[in-house]
Amino acid sequence: MKENRIVVTGGSGMVGKSLKDIMPNAIYLSSSDYNLTSEKGVSQMYYDIKPTTVIHLAAKVGGIIDNINKPYNYFTDNVLMDTLLIDYARKNQVERFIGMLSTCIYPDKVEEYPMTEQMIHNGPPTPTNFSYGYAKRCLAVQIDACNKEYGTKYQYLTPCNLYGEYDKFGENSHFVASLIKKIIIADRNGEENIELFGTGNPLRQYMYSHDLARVIKQCIDDDITDSFNVATKENLSIKEITEIVLDAIQPNNVKGFNFDTSKPDGQYRKDVSTSKMETIIPGFKFTPLIDGIKETYGMVVSSNII
């Protein structure tokens, strides 16, 4: 039987580390191993490792302000990386390719929510993540085109917003990681309130990174090749999420929060349908938000990373 050599790009990131906890025998790559925005780097990776399966998690990601200020970098780096990895996977007869998208690919506004997989191209992405959103749409288009023209069984998963103990807790961190850090620092300083961007009204689905890792592993184990959204049904406002995080952490000094409405909100809502996933992986249980926050906070405290 042919050995299944699984390569995970973005192996040092949040989802990569979560995946490593349950798939320790895969090969996990970071940006220090190969330059995946370079044809030479991608070609060398396939030559050196000869993978049969590629789980592509690597991406240039960042917060709203960074996306607004560096649209060219977000588009170019992601398009180069995705295009080269898929093309060389096909050329090297890689059997399975799983690409990771983002709900940022979906239109800024639609007439009906939650958004289904068929609605990706029903309008432009939100202006605050426009370049990144289009770059990730290109990944979906390329995988669908490759399957149609060459008969490959490549797929993409579109997860909602993520959080977890392996997130970055510095610059360009995701919202929940940034919020946890802000609360910890404010609490140490004896502050009673924290300040957040926007109005607190935008709605978000949030998923524990370990849950996405379990979905990826199940796709490999059960030979699932469909492309689908991966998200919880829960769609909460930023204000409600902040309240849950405060409840999970139970800080000594911080009691509340204020919103700076002069700062941007980002996309108001982008909740996606879970119907297709429920058909493909029936009965999948997501980690409740408060439980995942407690796990994340516990790791942050025990590891002294803030």
Image: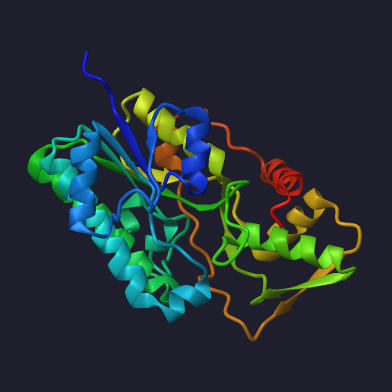
Image quarter where the N terminus lies is: top left
Residue found farthest to the left: 149
Q: Is residue 200 left or right of residue 38?
A: right
- Res. 246 in view: yes
Q: Is residue 70 above or below residue 179?
A: below
**3 left or right of 102?**
left
Whole-percent x and y of residue 249? Answer: 80, 51
Task: Please name whichever residue, 153 or 78, is drawn nearer the observer in this view of the structure.
Answer: 78
Place of residue 183 in the rendered image (x, y in percent of width and height, measured from the top left): 77, 62
Q: Above or below — where is 220 with respect to 213?
A: above
Q: Name the image quarter holding residue 23.
A: top left
Q: Is residue 121 visible?
A: no
Query: What residue sits 27% from the left and 53% below the top?
Result: 140
The colour scheme used here is: rainbow
Specify the farthest residue to the bottom.
Answer: 262
Residue at position x 79%, y 56% in the image? 246
Work out whether residue 108 or residue 29 is closer to the camera in this orientation and state it. Answer: 29
Residue drawn at the location 46% of the way across and 42% of the way down:
16
Left or right: 156 in relation to 234: left
Q: Camera-side residue: 185 or 292?
A: 185
